[in-house]
Amino acid sequence: MSRPRRLAAGVVTGLAALLVFLALVVPEQITRLPAGASPWAALVRVPVEALLAAAVLLVLPGRARVVAASVIGAGLGLLTVLKVVDVGFMTVLARPFDPVMDWPLFADAYRFVRDSFGTAGAVGAAVGAVALVVGVLAGMVFAVRRLAEVGARHDGVARAGVGVAAVAWLALALLGTSLVPGIYVASDSAAVLAREQVLRVPAAAHDRQVFASEAASDAFRDVPPASLLTGLRDKDVIFAFVESYGRSAIEDPRMEREVGAVLSAGTAELRDAGYGARSGFLTSPTTGGGSWLAHATLHSGVWVDNEQRYRSLVSTDRFTLTGAFQKAGAWRTVGVEPGITFDWPESRFYGFDHLYDSRTLGYQGPSFGWAPVPDQFTLRAFTDLEYARAGRGPLMAEVTLVSSHTPWAPLPSLIGWDEIGDGSVYREQHARGRKAGEVWEDPDRIRAEYAASVAYSIGSLVSWVREYGDDDLVLVFLGDHQPAPIVVGDEASHDVPVTIVAHDRKVLDRVADWGWTDGLEPDPGAPVWRMDTFRDRFLTTFGTR
């Protein structure tokens, strides 16, 4: 073999070894290392899986060795893909990917990219993702087969090297050597990842049984209509979800100044208009995304923290908050969901008398990032279509405000209520707004735009109450989940603020024993309830005592 060919062969072998090594040793938390830790130090590891694979391949004859190398390479390639997906899930949702329950989220991710960056961007991202998966699988099979071939040609050296490395691994494991806290030099992370993925299958089956039992138990299903929501009769009750409105928005020093100012001013403005408010915290079942899990949890009174539970729930007739208002027979129930851009069969579970989505609100302006409709327009459309309709009876509505959804660019701003029209006025705001690519170049800018988006959403609500609210209005508004870790960090709680606003003091008197803070902003020491407990507390508080 000529020298250039030997050099090329050596380079290929070296790249194959590097690829396999990185696949085995790069930790899943590589993007979430402790402060001051070097990513390079996290790569100083001896993977036990490489030693075991090498030992097996060295004792196998030629054809069996090729087959085994191909199987090992495919398995390692699959684990590498799962590790990359895990990193993505941790970055966005602060949890690892579940191979049993999370497949539907890829369709949601595609729709998010399409709505935020256009169809071309979404198709390009999908094609790139598929190409990456195929490339990783094929590359890993080639790499392991290449190393197996080289090891077979240099059998003696390879056996000696594996023996020395095995002794070193055992010594490092006994000593617990670690250059980065929680990441040991004697590594078995690939084996641990594989075991965790396998164990999620029986765990999912068990969780399905547990959830079926939880959903079947309901203390309010058989409460007679005359005893339901008696403390709210003749009131208009609005539940408003504010997208990504998390506890960090009012407590993180990097964001609380802007959001806190809106909450403080809103408290004063509503007080001057005759309204009182009480605020606390709920612990959401999700973070970074998965708004539908929070909606389902609040309405149903059961903990819905994964796709399997959500799919199971919406196929049942579980008693919901909407169902309670309907059963009482004293309210028309409507859903206002501007984030819905396609048919939504799950709406049957919630049982709204009427559902408005982005296609039926009459909006003729541009989308702001992912948000198809600005929040102020959503509230005005709700007013025109339902709230201000002449001759109507009491109304119960869920209104979802989506302007504070990722990517927080461009953002709308408040305008006069009489200027809104069909939404065409927003074209100018959209044209001069910041682009997502500009915002996402800098984490500080991301946080600033996130805070501005939450301030806009809450400001829209406060302005709406002042403009259109009356003595019979009861407004409950809350966050669905915290934003992504890039905004709040990896250690943020799952808590979200929740507030009840009412003009009638009797309504607020009923919640006096909740211990909530006076005003729109809960104190740090305000009570924290799991979101699945809210339905029962609400129905108990406002039902016949």
Image (spheres, grey):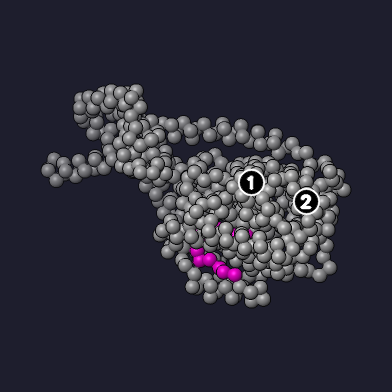
71 with respect to 470 (left or right): left
Q: Residue at x 24, y 40 (%)?
A: 14
Q: Is residue 211 above or below residue 377?
A: above
Kind of residue at disc 2: Asp
Relative to 416, 149 lies left or right = left
Answer yes or no: is residue 344 visible: no
Residue 273 in percent (x, y) is at 72, 65
Helix, strand or loop: magenta stretch: loop
- Front-lying residue, 121 or 444: 444
Residue 52 on the magenta span: no
Q: Mark 1: few, some, or many residues within 10 Å (few <14, many ≥20)?
A: some
Instruction: Find residue 483 and report its horizontal and vertical position in percent.
Output: 53, 52
| Circles 1, 2 touching at the beta carbon (< 8 Å) | no
Looking at this view, is 37 or 188 the one in front? 37
Which circle's residue, 1 or 2, is located before the other in the chain?
Answer: 2
Q: Secondary structure at mark 1?
A: loop
Residue matched to label 1: 526
Could you tell me which secondary element the residue under label 2 belongs to?
helix
- Residue 526 is left or right of residue 484, and the answer is right
Q: Which residue in the structure is indicated by mark 2?
A: 509
Q: Quadrant of the C terminus?
A: top right
- Quarter that holds the N terminus: top left
**Where residue 318 sits: x, y (%)?**
74, 43
Which disc number belongs to residue 443?
none
- Type of amino acid under label 1: Ala
Q: Is residue 416 visible?
A: yes
Q: Which residues make up the magenta segment?
A: 401-414
Residue at the image position 50 percent from the left and 53 percent from the top: 253
Q: Is residue 117 above or below residue 57?
A: below
As measured in the structure, the alpha-carbon distance from the residue carrying label 1 to the one carrying label 2 is 17 Å
Q: Position of residue 334 (x, y in %)?
A: 74, 59
* Furthest-right residue in this view: 226
